[in-house]
Amino acid sequence: MWHRIVMNLITIEDLTVTYGGVTALKNVSLDVNSSEIVTIVGPNGSGKTSLLKAIIGAVTPLEGSVKIKPDLKVGYVPQRLNLDPTLPISVGKFMRLTNKIDKNSCLVALERAGVPKLIEKQMSELSGGQLQRVLLARALLGTPEILILDEATQSLDQPGSADFYRQIEKVRQETSCAVLMISHDLHVVMSASDRVICLNGHICCSGAPETVLAAPEYQELFGTDTNGALALYRHSHDHQHDEPSETTEVAN
């Protein structure tokens, strides 16, 4: 039985970000709570990267605020890793580059990411899907309270992306960590999302995945052909046997 205790991890209020007089985000307000999976979706140039930068403190907002839970532990999974293919480094050594951890901790993280047998494999020999799993495992070191995924499956095909996001859902169930995903395509990530926020310089619409897919604002940006996404979403949830059976709400 999976018990969910809800507390606020990130609160963004009336956020406006500009670059040289050009507005990237205007009056954006949202929050991310513990144990939930939130997906920020939007087309290229919609402000997704600016929002992420504001959350991690890489840009200073013109207006508004970003409030982070004190001492929040964050795990970050990037879009890609630019690693010299001639560099002889194993997965285990890569995971310990900036973390003083033992081999067993690496194995636990790799197991949680779904790739327990890769610890001795060379980084240069990994497939795209294996590399993203290793990056996920590295992000899980230190037991983060929230995982941030920045277009983490951009280089994967749709089946590979679907497998990756199923693993993310499993990680959430095993660790109760929150997940904030940045994506340009809702079709694959929606099955793993509790809440979706559609961004295009401002918040166009938000809510459950099916609600966002049906919203006129979303369809104006991405088109009205959402049958494939809805089928994928419903198939995933119709065949989900590990859904949380009890939720405990705790006021923040």
Image: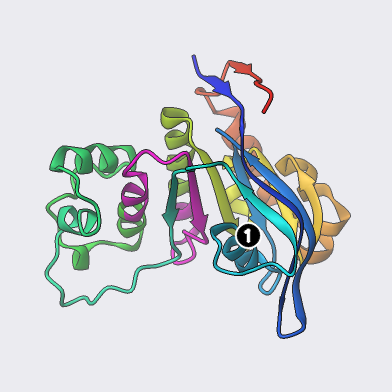
- Count the numbered circles shown: 1
Residue 227 seen in the figure: no
Whether residue 88 sits left or right of residue 175 in the image: it is: left
Residue linked to disc 1:
185
Whether residue 148 sits left or right of residue 68 in the image: it is: left
- Does the stretch in magenta take in 56? no
Q: Residue furthest front?
A: 70
Q: How far across and down, in percent of the image, does residue 77 sit?
A: 43, 56
Q: In the rendered view of the protein, which quadrant contains the C terminus?
A: top right
Disc 1 residue type?
A: Asp
Residue 2 seen in the figure: yes
The quarter of the displayed image where residue 56 is located:
bottom right
Whether residue 48 sits left or right of residue 64 in the image: it is: left
Q: Is residue 82 above or below residue 14?
A: below
The residue under the point 24% across, 61% down is: 126
The quarter of the displayed image where residue 202 is located:
bottom right
Neighbor class of circle 1 (other Cα within 10 Å; few <14, some 14-19, many 20+) is some
Look at the image and give the residue range highlighted in magenta: 135-161
Q: How is the image coloured?
A: rainbow
The residue under the point 31% across, 59% down is: 131
- Does the stretch in magenta take in 143? yes
For mark 1, give the secondary structure.
loop
The residue under the point 85% across, 58% down is: 217
Q: Is residue 214 above or below residue 79?
A: above
Q: How far across and down, in percent of the image, does residue 187 sit?
A: 63, 53
The residue under the point 45% across, 65% down is: 79
Q: Residue furthest bottom?
A: 20
Q: How far across and down, in percent of the image, does residue 23 sit?
A: 77, 76
Nearer the observer, 195 or 12: 12
Nearer the observer, 182 or 163: 182
Nearer the observer, 66 or 107: 66
